[in-house]
Image (spheres, grey):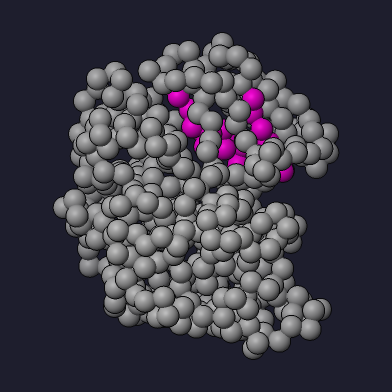
Amino acid sequence: MRSTKWFARLHGNADMYLTAIGQRRIPYLSADALGERRDARVRRMVQHAAQYVPHYRDLFRARGIDPARIRTFVDLQQLPLLRKADVRANPNSFRSEAPVARYSIPFLTSGSSGAPLNVYHDPASLLANMAFGLRVRPLLERHGVNRAASRQLYIGYPGSTLQTVWRAHDEWAIAPMRPERCFVSLLEPIESVLSAINRFRPDVLYGYGTYLEHFARAVYSRGLFLHPPRAIVYGAEVMTEQGRRTIEHDLGIPVYSDYAAVEVFKLAFSCEANRGLHVHEDLSPTWIARANGHRANSGERGEVVVSNLVNHGTVLLNYCLGDVAAVSTTPCPCSRTLPMLTDLEGRVEDTIVLPDGRFLHPRAVWMIVRRRPSVIRYQLIQHSALSFELRLVTPDEATFAQVAPQISSDLEAIFGADSNVESTFHQDLPLGPGGKFRMVVALPSRVQ
């Protein structure tokens, strides 16, 4: 077994270094060249799904679909739309049985729909994503960041997706140089986070869009000293334009967005022109669906639908992310030719502001709930400064009675001694307008 894994590691690294060749040029290829690369990946992934993935084997057989006839991205869009609930109902049916997926690593989604999901990524795809990262490296190099020798600080929660990716890279990648990395929990008070940044002096600061926005406003409004990183990269959520202005104009730090999800690690990124998000067309081609499932016109807002053509762990084709956006056909001044997403809406999360001045990101709540897999969905509502209602969906009331007291107690420990968290049992928690679901509903407040 050990020799088999070692061979898989060598093979994956060889592919990674071969894949790295020419990656910097890909964002500037012609539409025809990008389309050829994309469609070649479509054909390979569809054949893989037909041979190794139970869900697609059954789907093609039941509907009389010949996988060999799915040759382009347009053909791929004819497959049924796939939603998180479909995958969550039978997650193993989407896992590949191929040898390449043997050592796949599980990643737990944060449950932006309120219902978490385990998604597996094979090590070869994680290594390939390191090579694909060369496409965006010029953005950081503009600010003097040499990634191989850079210092990177990440503000997140223990066991987060990025931490798991970094651990996988440490285990699988054979690299002569690695960035120096530091992790800080978003549960820490702002003073502790600030102290860690000033002590480590990172070149690049990574984190959640909402958290970094609140953090920057607090630093600026309180006149606190922050050692300025050369760049800030946010993901997982959107950042408001006001938040971006605070960081870029008031603090003087350039900001970039890495649009990704647990289901799709390489989806899109912002550039120096900040006109939208450039989609990795050949890795995770994306289209916009209307409410009736039909393709939206250019510039028309709808649901983001993506196919991951890289990952062989959990295979997801025509997958609805739950975010809303539009596709722009306006050329970007940066000269990149990748398709662009604009007007991205979704994953805007409430931040809880406590009387002592602390602000807690929703991932702080998620850190506690995720330890209880019997919780199907949850929602925390802040009724007053220290009064909360925790709505839990569990298989039955007996399960609720078992897990609710401990979750409430753990949350009260975070919120403070005078806080109160009342738990209520629910058979379901309906989605909000536009199919959105807010896992945390906080009081309107401003961080000072």
Q: Residue at x 57, y 24 (%)?
A: 442
Check residue 83 for magenta coloring.
Answer: no
Q: Residue at x 53, y 45 (%)?
A: 345
Q: Position of residue 106 (x, y in %)?
A: 56, 59
Q: Quadrant of the C terminus?
A: top left
- Residue 265 appears anywhere in the view: no
Vertically, is 41 above or below 350? below
Give the residues in magenta.
359-381
**Quick one: 296 or 59, which is closer to the camera?**
296
In the figure, is residue 357 to the left or right of 432? left
Picture coordinates of residue 308, whole percent (x, y): 54, 67
Above or below 368: residue 265: below
**Percent coordinates x, y for residue 424 in the rendering:** 76, 26
Quadrant of res 97: bottom right
Q: Residue furthest left?
A: 144
Q: Residue at the far top: name it.
A: 418
Along the viewing direction, whichever of 238 and 18 lies nearer the viewer = 238
Q: Is residue 140 above or below residue 62?
A: above
* Residue 241 on image: x %, y %: 39, 37
Q: Quadrant of residue 421?
A: top right
Q: Is residue 373 magenta?
A: yes
Residue sitting at x 22%, y 67% = 176
